[in-house]
Amino acid sequence: MPKLIVTNREGETSDIEVEEGLTVMEAIRDNGFDELLALCGGCCACATCHVYIDDSVGGTLADMSEDEDDLLESSDHRKESSRLSCQVPFTADLDGMKVTISPED
């Protein structure tokens, strides 16, 4: 099963196995990372699932939508590598991708 490497806000890193078809947000949430709030449940309406994706990702990420871009603009912690994890489908070609949960806004 493909793996996702998640770094929490305290800097602790965990490898989690992810079923294909889940979003990065669902994988993180379902593996007990309570700091990733995901208040809207993945509807791209709140930006509480903000993560930084390591630029060495091997696979192809889904393009950022205008709605996602607008929501990230409201974050004080936006970086070039910022994404809303609910908008990133996890596929087998993303095996080993590293993400860091952003600070809370």
Image (cartoon, helix red, strand yellow):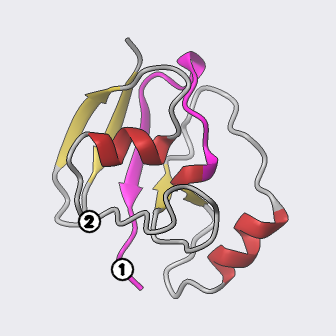
Q: Residues within 10 Å of mark 1 (few under 14, many from 20)?
A: some
Residue 10, quarter of picture: bottom left
Mark 2 highlights which residue? Answer: 35
Question: Is 100 a magenta residue?
Answer: yes
CA distance separating discs 2 and 1 = 8 Å
Query: Residue 57 location in percent, x, y?
Result: 56, 35
Q: Nearer the viewer, residue 12 or 37?
A: 37
* Secondary element at tag 2: loop
* Secondary element at tag 1: loop
Q: Which residues are magenta?
A: 87-105
Q: Is residue 90 left or right of residue 34?
A: right
Rendered residue at 59%/59% (across/down) = 83
Q: Is residue 67 left or right of residue 87?
A: right
Kind of residue indicated by mark 2: Glu
Q: Mark 2 and mark 1 in contact? Answer it, CB < 8 Å.
A: yes
Rendered residue at 43%/63% (across/down) = 38
